[in-house]
Image (cartoon, grey):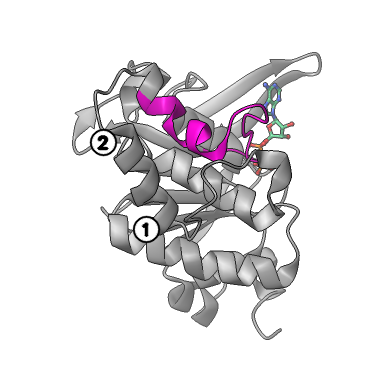
Amino acid sequence: MVKHFETRRGVFRAVNGVDVECAPGTITALLGPSGSGKTTLLRLIAGLEEPTCGRVFFDNEDITSLGVQERDLGFVFQGYALFKHMTVAENITFGPRMRKMGIDLDAKVEELLKLTGLTGLGGRYPPQLSGGQKQRVAVARALACNPRLMLLDEPFGALDPLVRKSLRRGLREIVQQVGVTTIIVTHDQEEAWDLADHVVIFNKGVIEQRGTPEEVAREPASPFVMNFVGD
Ligand code: ADP
């Protein structure tokens, strides 16, 4: 996959020959320093950017020319992007309502509130929630249309370390329960190690290393990882 941006200073190679494969039902972490191309790759997978060259496949189906809506994705954005004027329940059902999915929305809300540990909070508005609760609403909303792939961009952003740790555990359990294939973008090594089955390490638009956290930790090839191992 390649994505070049035209800038005033010439062509910028944000993603420069990267291929990533995700096993069904697993969590893959795209890890690397800021500006290394992780979010750009996530946006290419989502169909929010058009690749300069390369293709996106899902279950052997070429989905490169499909629009964002047609790709069956759940997205957790940086900062969550919840609708402040909608209740938690309305946030969660936004996707199914837009797509006129014809499902029992109340049952779906109950199921997802339970899954994300938010039972009883469906009537609240986002400003009434803690940071961790907002994050869980974002995950519930991402899962509402039964996506085949969930994409999360720095989903633990501004949260404090204790909350981050418990949310990581929660997210792993949710992914295991739902069985949804998941890709998470993070610059936090501990997060990647805790969460992911497979880690892909980015630097300057290319992949420096990949493997299970154990494999990468055993023989780290990236200075970015070496800083972490042994902490
Ligand atoms: P990361 O997620 O690893 O922090 P990004 O994928 O967001 O990195 O960005 C990689 C590089 O691509 C950055 O230097 C960023 O400035 C650049 N970039 C991203 N989007 C654009 C764009 N639309 N036009 C020009 N440069 C871009």
Marks 2 and 1, Cα distance to the nearest angstrom? 18 Å
Q: Which residue is mark 1?
A: 175
Q: How many marks?
A: 2
- In the image, residue 173 above or below residue 148: below
78 in the magenta segment: yes
Q: Amino acid at mark 2?
A: Phe
The residue depicted at 73 percent of the width and 41 percent of the height is: 127
The residue depicted at 54 percent of the width and 52 percent of the height is: 136
Residue 135 position within the rendered picture, expressed as x and y whole percent measured from the top left: 60, 50
- In the image, residue 63 above or below residue 181: above
For disc 2, the neighbor class at 10 Å (few under 14, some 14 to 19, many from 20) is some
Q: Viewed as shown, does residue 127 lie left or right of 74?
A: right
Which image quadrant is residue 201 in?
A: bottom right
Q: Quadrant of the N terminus?
A: top left
Q: Which mark is residue 16?
A: none
The residue at the far right in this view is 9
Q: Quadrant of the C terminus?
A: bottom right
Do the numbered discs 2 and 1 sit on residues whose CB atoms are within 8 Å? no
Magenta residues, start to end: 76-96
The residue depicted at 31 percent of the width and 50 percent of the height is: 180
Q: Amino acid at mark 1?
A: Val
Which label's residue is closer to the chain start, 2 or 1? 2
Q: Viewed as shown, does residue 201 lie left or right of 51?
A: right
For disc 1, the neighbor class at 10 Å (few under 14, some 14 to 19, many from 20) is some
- In the image, residue 208 above or below residue 102: below
Q: In the image shown, does 213 or 98 lie closer to the viewer?
A: 98
Mark 1: secondary structure: helix
Q: Which residue is mark 2?
A: 58
Q: Quadrant of ligand 1?
A: top right
